[in-house]
């Protein structure tokens, strides 16, 4: 641009002056002015050009410095182990300080190696790692790398192609996963041991169930036979003995018969308790109100001479085993009836409430109650908080109720006060 401007200026300015100025002295004067004007114009023109060029150079330099700063922050100052790898040869061309510290080598020593030198296993995966046709990061690769001291570590490599000075390089991050692998191995061993233990416990449980079945069979058949004999001989004694038998002897015979009947009831309750533990749940949708009404109808003949005020609130629909949940209501309602027999009138209320993710059912009576410091004994087999002479029973009903509720993933508990009655609660999950 400067040469073109100078050539055109000299060519046309001289010809123009020759035409316009005839006097030689004036011509010399105007040529001097023309030269001065040319110097001033061209100097300004060059100043603008140089200034514009310098501005571009400063902008490019600033971009270069910023780019180098970003590169250093992302690569050299990164706490992760970073490598730049030539994808054609696998040689290492650049590393950061974290890589030098990890491998225990200097910058120069590490840059003389290749990815093949570091890897001690799965070398067949390295060509796949070096492929750079994709513009995205590779999925993680797992290798074993050897450190300078000979230690072999498990590593995970994430790599992807980047362009540097018109060359494609593989930007690689190395993450040590040795401890993670060891933890996974421990978990795998623990899982195998746990599976083995579960199999052993399952086998033991199956054996225990078979033993329980054998015990139940023995109870059902071997223990009932002596009871039948006792009852039979008591009947024969009643027939053979005279009517004027002394009262004491007749009391002994009645007591023998009563105790044998109680023993039979106890055997039945024990068998029911054993069956409940083995019985599989057959869950269906059932209306608790219908279930409670069925229980009340069942016990109505036994309480027709009792004065009882019933209060049965609305009850929800639940999912559970019909026969087992019915047994829970039988045990709890019979308990309420039994322990309120000295009250005139007895008051028994049944209802439910919702608490978070569960339904809580209750049955409340105004009977004899009990001391809460003995509440932990309520649901144990053969545990009784009252005299057998005052209240009949075997002490198995509440234990059976607890087992059934637990099988439904629920809880059962009680609150009471001596002489003020008791309230029994049991919960069932809203969503089985």
Image: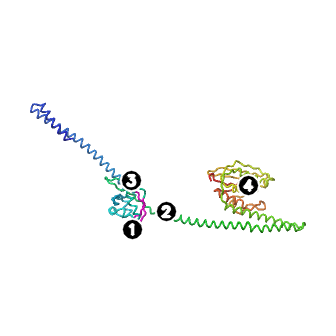
Q: Position of residue 214 (x, y in %)?
A: 69, 67
Foreground pick, 323 / 418: 323
Please tell me which of labels 3 and 4 falls first in the chain.
3
Q: Pointer 3: what residue?
A: 134
**Depicted 13 relative to depicted 364: above or below:** above
Q: Nearer the viewer, residue 255 or 325?
A: 325
**Labels 3 & 4 near each other (Cβ < 8 A):** no
Which residue is painted at 12% across and 31% down in the image? 19
> Can the viewer see residue 197?
yes
Residue located farthest toward the left when viewing the structure as drawn? 24
Q: Nearer the viewer, mark 3 or mark 4?
A: 3
Start-end of magenta stretch = 141-158
Is residue 342 found inside the magenta-colored segment of the image?
Answer: no
Residue assigned mark 4: 333
Q: CA distance from mark 2 to mark 1?
A: 23 Å
- Of the numbered discs 2 and 1, the one sitting upstream in the chain is 1
């Amino acid at each position: 641009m400067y040469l073109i401007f100078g050539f055109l200026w000299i060519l046309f300015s001289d010809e123009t002056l020759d035409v316009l100025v005839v006097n030689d002295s004036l011509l010399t004067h105007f040529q001097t002015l023309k030269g001065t004007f040319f110097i001033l114009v061209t100097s300004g023109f060059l100043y603008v050009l140089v200034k514009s060029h310098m501005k571009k150079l400063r902008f490019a330099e600033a971009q270069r410095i910023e780019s180098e700063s970003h590169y250093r922050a992302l690569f050299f100052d990164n706490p992760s182990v970073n490598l730049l790898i030539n994808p054609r040869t696998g040689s290492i061309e650049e590393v950061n300080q974290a890589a030098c510290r990890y491998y225990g080598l200097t910058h120069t020593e590490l840059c003389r190696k290749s990815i093949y030198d570091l890897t001690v296993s799965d070398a067949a995966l390295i060509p796949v790692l070096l492929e750079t046709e994709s513009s995205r990061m590779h999925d993680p690769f797992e290798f074993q790398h050897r450190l300078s001291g000979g230690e072999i570590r498990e590593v995970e490599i994430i790599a992807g192609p980047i362009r540097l000075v018109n060359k494609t390089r593989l930007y690689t991050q190395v993450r040590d996963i040795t401890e993670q692998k060891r933890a996974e191995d421990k978990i795998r061993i623990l899982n195998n041991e746990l599976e083995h233990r579960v199999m052993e416990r399952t086998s033991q449980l199956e054996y225990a169930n078979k033993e329980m079945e054998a015990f139940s069979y023995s109870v059902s058949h071997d223990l009932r036979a002596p009871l039948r004999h006792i009852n039979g001989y008591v009947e024969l004694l009643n027939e053979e003995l005279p009517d004027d038998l002394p009262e004491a002897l007749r009391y002994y015979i009645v007591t023998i018969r009563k105790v044998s009947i109680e023993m039979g009831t106890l055997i039945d309750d024990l068998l029911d308790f054993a069956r409940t533990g083995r019985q599989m749940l057959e869950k269906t949708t059932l209306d608790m109100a219908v279930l409670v009404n069925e229980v009340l109808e069942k016990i109505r003949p036994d309480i027709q001479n009792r004065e009882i005020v019933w209060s049965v609130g609305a009850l929800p629909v639940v999912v559970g085993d019909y026969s087992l949940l019915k047994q829970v209501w039988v045990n709890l309602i019979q308990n309420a009836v039994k322990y309120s027999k000295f009250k005139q009138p007895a008051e028994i209320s049944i209802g439910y409430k919702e608490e978070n993710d569960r339904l809580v059912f209750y049955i409340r009576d105004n009977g004899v109650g009990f001391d809460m410091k003995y509440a932990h004994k309520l649901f144990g087999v053969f545990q009784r908080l009252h005299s057998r002479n005052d209240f009949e029973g075997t002490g198995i009903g509440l234990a059976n109720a607890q087992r059934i509720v637990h099988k439904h993933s629920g809880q059962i508990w009680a609150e009471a006060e001596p002489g003020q009655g008791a309230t029994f609660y049991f919960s069932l999950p809203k969503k089985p």
